[in-house]
Amino acid sequence: MRDGYKLNFLGDNFRIELPRPGLALISDILQPPGLPDGEFVIPYINYSLSMSRSTRQALYSAANVDLRKMQKVPSRKGRNWFIDTRVGSGNQIPNYPYQGTLWDRGHLTRRTAVTWGKDADYATRASNDSCAYTNACMQHKNFNEDDWRAVELLVSHFKDADKLTVITGPVFTKADRYYTREFEDYPVRIPAAFWKILSYVGDDQKLKTQAFVFFQDLPSIRNAKGRARIRLKDMQVTTTEVSLWTGLEFDQVLFDSNPLKFYDGPEAITMKSRNELIKKHSNLVELDAGIGGDESVREAREMFPLEDFYELIAEVSWV
């Protein structure tokens, strides 16, 4: 049985809705022919996703992860890639573009993230279910096994909680390349970047969110040892940025619980002033660049200039 992503997986007080397509994406979201009209979310074991009509790749893939219930899957099982007949063979990228190339079937929801449950048999079926071609995107071998692996390992070895929700997906821009094996092949659009948003309940019983973006650009493709120099902290972004990059609308709680980068204080603050502020205002959030209050966190969602967004797109480069 494929229950799919559970909204209240972290608890009834920490419900996290699935992303919704913004106005620019509404006409692009696929109505899977194997699902009833009006149902766009495709359930799998421990995760769900929605598909793009134009790219034939997922808009996002959302998983529930329970590190306490992880099961060991036999090394020769749970890795059978398949075409999901509910979606239709023409609406997903098959194995053909990956065969004999440097492009991997890059899992969005990682296989080992969903291999949990009541027993090894259930986990093996979950592992196989993660190998749907709908859950794969074009990832260069060096990127998939190096840069992207860094954030995947963060999830599998997460230290601050046992249960997480992990939502991930590709970023497509005007600078994207297209891959074809033969002259008349249907071109496959290569994502410019990938994002991952993970949420969990902290020891203080508050929802916490971290978001990351990794660019599949020239340096990441050429370098097979990027993970050794990556600091995950440097790859973190606001939920606002992920929304602008993707056109997806995220649950309000993913903004409120991820205050990264935004604050209403000065660029630099002295240690003495910092300590005085923390003592005086218990609701202040300490950030890398300064001190931020709850009000600035709420306002931050509207403060990302559109010209900055276009500038980021222009920086994506390809061979």
Image (spheres, rainbow, N blue to C red):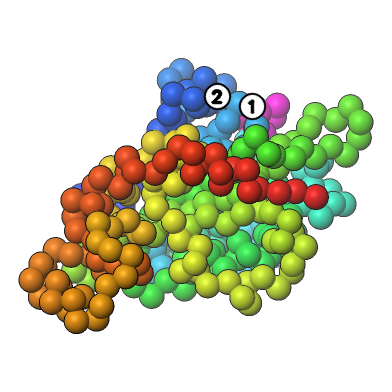
Q: Which mark is residue 236?
A: none
Q: Residue 135: say if magenta.
A: no
> For this rendering, which residue is in front, 222 or 102?
222
| Magenta segment main secondary structure | loop
Q: Which residue is mark 1?
A: 54
Residue closest to the far right: 183
- Disc 2 packing (10 Å; few <14; some 14–19; many ≥20): some
Q: Viewed as shown, does residue 247 lie left or right of 303?
A: right
Which amino acid type corresponds to the residue marked 1 in the rendered image? Ser
**Region of the chain picked out in magenta, as a range:** 85-92
Residues at badges 1 and 2 in contact (C-beta under 8 Å)?
yes
In the image, residue 52 sits, relative to residue 3, either above or below, namely above
In the image, residue 193 sits, relative to residue 266, either above or below, namely above
Q: Which mark is residue 28?
A: 2
> For this rendering, which residue is in front, 7 or 58?
58
Q: Viewed as shown, does residue 34 lie left or right of 20?
A: right
Report the residue at 14% width, 71% height from top. 277
Q: Is residue 156 visible?
A: no
Residue 213: x percent and y percent?
A: 52, 55
Which amino acid type corresponds to the residue marked 2 in the rendered image? Asp
- For numbered disc 1, what is the local secondary structure? loop
Report the residue at 52% width, 72% height from top. 231
> For this rendering, which residue is in front, 308 or 233?
308
Report the residue at 18% width, 55% height from top. 294
- Disc 1 packing (10 Å; few <14; some 14–19; many ≥20): some
Residue 130: x percent and y percent?
A: 57, 50
Report the residue at 84% width, 37% height from top. 180
Residue 83: x percent and y percent?
A: 68, 38
